[in-house]
Image: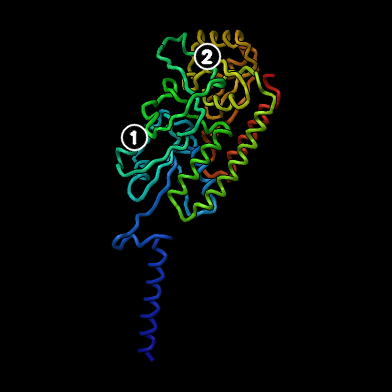
Amino acid sequence: MNGKKIILTVVCCALAAILAAAFLIPRGGKNPEGDGAEPVRKLICTTYPVYLLVRDVAKGGPVRPELLLPPDTGCPHDYSLTPGDLMKLSGGRTLLIRNGLGLDDSLWETALSANPKLKSIALAEGISGVIHEEEDDDDDDDDHEEHADHGHEAAESCTDPECGHHHHHHHHGHENGHLFASPDTAAEMVKNAVQALSGFDPENASLYEKNGKKIQAELLALAGEFRSAGLTGRKIAVQHDIYAYLARLCGMEMEVSLRAEESQSLSPALIARLCKQIREKKVTVLYAEPQYSKETAELIAREAGIAYSVLDPCASGPADPEHGYYQKVMRKNLETLRGGNGK
């Protein structure tokens, strides 16, 4: 009797070990400890808007995109990767999905130096109609205000994967990389996200294609509402050139840009100069961003005698938003623009 109990115990232990080993083997892969093992795959997104779009395309599949930067970072022009960030990008079969066009290319270069085997895809590159900005090499205070008619000019896109890697600062770069801030150009980024995910996980390519088509249809329909919202010709001042694509979509004229990073400490003389420019350009509203301090923007709007409102470009947000969060934010922006401010 005791012998039977011993045999039964041995069999149970063996079965438990087999089951435990099975759960340790990645789905669709080989045991990471075995010969010829397939490395654990990681898909990491640099910025919040890239993460939002990729995560929605990946919905329902086995791939779980991760966000590299903190969700409240905003545009990462001056962000430096931490040791923890580099740890996320080390080892395994890692794909880094980034924005590109100078917005986060310095992060890519730093990450690549730490992990030469790291692969990367830029969602904003290869899209037609990228807005090119003028060089601004004069540091005199007189030139801190920008005559930004970004909403009117389009140029051929950059298709070279290395394009934009040396344009780390949006004040001096050529391409405006903020395509995510308008639903029409975000829809093009979704198309690139589908291709990236399908290449990363070919077995579920049909799912990503289905999700992508649905998201693109939603974004293009939303873009149509922006386009027909009766905003053509509205003269606006902005806190940042992030709104260039949305202004172009709506037909609004970006006349003055405060430069968000510098607007925290604008001198009284420069504020007076900006107010004068706003009046001369017949600007009717100043649009600010939620991730920047609003005091200076409110002061300028008040002194210039124009309306003030906030638009959210989705550059930052909650750590774990619901699917479709991007569309929800853009819908709110549309309601803000339709609200009558500046018309």
Identify the residue at horizontal 49%, vertical 27% (top origin): 130
Q: Secondary structure at mark 1?
A: helix
Disc sitting over residue 291 in the figure:
none
Disc 2 residue type?
His
Up the image or down, 297 lies above or below 85; here it is above
Q: Give x and y (percent) for residue 175.
A: 45, 25
Q: Is residue 80 left or right of residue 342?
A: left
Q: Are marks 1 and 2 in contact (CB under 8 Å)?
A: no
Residue 109 image label: 1
Q: Quadrant of residue 136?
A: top left
Residue 107, image x and y in percent? 38, 34
State the CA–CA distance, disc 1 to disc 2. Answer: 32 Å
Quadrant in which the C terminus is drawn: top right
- Report the amino acid beneath label 1: Glu
Q: On screen, 187 above or below 5?
A: above
Relative horizontal placement of residue 170, taking residue 303 as reference (left or right): left
Asked if residue 43 lies left or right of residue 210, the reply is left
Residue closest to the eye, 131 or 273: 131
- Residue, x 35% and y 62% (percent of image)? 31
Looking at marks 1 and 2 on the same chain, the residue that comes earlier in the sequence is marked by 1
Specify few, some or many for label 2: CA neighbours under 10 Å numbering under 14, 14-19, or 20 or more: some
Please tell me the numbered disc located at residue 147. 2
Please provide percent x and percent y for residue 316.
Answer: 52, 35
> Is residue 4 shown above or below 310?
below
